[in-house]
Each structure stands twice: as structure tokens, then as C-alpha cells.
């Protein structure tokens, strides 16, 4: 097994007498585990395949080393965006103003804002799309289906469904960070038919544990 590995970056837990530290380790085709613990805790690091659809499009970025979310930025240059009003879709071209492209939404309008790239997540992972705290406080931009989910087999350009939740026109600018994504594992389980009996002292459903 170890002789067939081709330069994978992995993380290995090394256990000390009083603490533990997470280290990065590059394993090549000639590498072998130093200890049984190394072999047992050997993990491949998955990655996200990123395909920019326009020049200058960068992968989503985290703001700090401790940030869980990757910021998602609107790509509006010379784009036509699908806008929804009362359930009816129409395409709206972004307008260039002061050297950049902008999309204006009337109160209550929704839109699928394009991000300018495709991406493929590793099998067993999903990207949860959430509002950014600063955007939520400072503007009336609402993530229409928050938290949204991007599946690992989604093949098209990534977009974020947004809504103008205010009473005035909302302007979205090219490059504006409109949302964030959290990458997480998920489990797939089968359903089996059977009786669902009471298993704890809980006696009811919604509201049964009090307010």
C-alpha cells in the first residue's frame, strides 16, 4: 500500500506524554509509517476541484486562519442574471457604472447571483451556504434559502440565491462578498420500516420541552 502512494499531503496525530500536536507531513512513494500510531492515524487530505469560468476569478477565500467560512463573491462583469418577482423569472443585464458592473434588485425581488466558477466537492462533503454577519447587519441582502446546500455532484456554475428583504432598491456590486460557505462531511443512511416507540422521558413534539 505504502509503495503506491504518490505525494499526498496528510495530517498525522503525534501523541506526547502530556499533550498532542497536529503536524503536516508529505508522504512520497518511498515513505513508510514510522510507528503503528502513524499508520493508524494516516489521513488523506481531500481537496476541492476549482474551475474558473472567467479571467481573474479566484477560489473562495477565508478571512483569517481561524475562519470556518469561505467568502463567496458575486461575479457580475457583463453578466445577465436570473431575477424572480412573484414567482416569475426574467433575465436582467448587469449595468456598468463607475467602472464596475452592478445588479439592482427592487424590494422583494430574488436573484441567482453567479460566482464565476464551477467546483467539485469530494464525495461525502457538502458546502453549506450561509449569510455573512457583516452583510446581514449592514444591508438588506438576504440569502433566500439559508442555509443552502451545494452537493458534491453539482455540475454547473455556482450561484447564490438572494433576496432584497428591505423597502428600498438593493445594489449588488461585482466582487462583493455576498455569502459564505462552510464545508462539512455528511452521512448517508438507509431507511428501514419499523415502529417508532418512546425512548426517553420526552412525551411530545413541538414545544414539548418548554419555552
Image (tube, grey):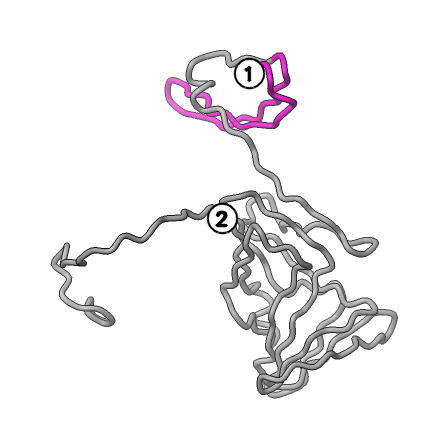
Q: Position of residue 65 (x, y in %)?
A: 59, 43
- Residue under label 1, please give it: 2
Residue 145 left/right relative to 201:
right
Q: Position of residue 30 (x, y in %)?
A: 62, 12
Q: Is residue 190 above or below residue 139?
A: above
Seen at 22% across and 69% down, the residue is 205
- Residue under label 2, please give it: 184
Tell which of 130 and 23 is nearer to you: 130
Tell which of 139 and 110 is nearer to you: 110
Q: Which mark is residue 138?
A: none
The stretch drawn in magenta includes residue 12: yes
Q: How far apart are the alpha carbons under marks 1 and 2?
A: 28 Å
> For the view shown, which residue lies furthest in the front direction?
193
Q: Earlier in the sequence, mark 1 or mark 2?
A: 1
Q: Quadrant of residue 90?
A: bottom right
Q: Position of residue 164 (x, y in %)?
A: 61, 79
Seen at 17% across and 68% down, the residue is 204
Q: From which residue to which does the magenta span run?
A: 1-30
Residue 189 left/right relative to 145:
left
Q: Position of residue 11 (x, y in %)?
A: 53, 28
Seen at 66% across and 85% down, the residue is 106
Q: Quadrant of residue 89?
A: bottom right
Seen at 73% across and 78% down, the residue is 91
Amino acid at each position: 500500500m505504502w509503495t503506491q502512494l504518490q505525494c499526498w499531503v496528510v495530517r498525522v496525530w503525534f501523541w506526547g506524554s502530556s499533550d498532542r500536536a497536529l503536524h503536516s507531513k508529505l508522504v512520497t512513494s518511498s515513505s513508510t509509517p514510522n510507528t503503528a500510531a502513524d499508520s493508524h492515524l494516516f489521513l488523506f487530505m481531500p481537496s476541492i476541484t476549482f474551475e474558473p469560468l472567467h479571467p481573474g476569478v479566484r477560489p473562495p477565500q477565508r478571512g483569517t486562519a481561524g475562519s470556518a467560512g469561505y467568502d463567496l463573491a458575486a461575479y457580475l462583469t457583463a453578466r445577465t442574471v436570473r431575477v424572480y418577482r412573484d414567482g416569475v423569472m426574467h433575465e436582467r443585464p448587469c449595468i456598468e457604472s463607475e467602472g464596475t458592473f452592478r445588479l439592482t434588485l427592487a424590494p422583494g425581488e430574488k436573484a441567482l447571483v453567479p460566482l464565476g466558477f464551477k467546483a467539485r466537492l469530494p464525495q461525502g462533503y457538502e458546502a453549506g451556504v450561509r449569510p455573512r454577519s457583516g452583510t446581514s447587519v449592514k444591508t438588506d441582502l438576504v440569502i433566500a434559502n439559508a442555509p443552502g446546500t451545494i452537493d458534491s455532484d453539482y455540475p454547473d456554475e455556482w450561484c447564490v440565491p438572494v433576496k432584497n428583504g428591505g423597502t428600498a432598491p438593493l445594489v449588488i456590486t461585482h466582487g462583493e462578498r455576498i455569502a459564505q460557505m462552510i464545508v462539512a462531511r455528511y452521512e448517508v443512511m438507509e431507511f428501514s420500516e419499523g415502529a417508532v416507540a418512546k425512548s426517553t422521558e420526552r412525551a411530545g413534539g413541538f414545544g414539548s420541552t418548554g419555552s
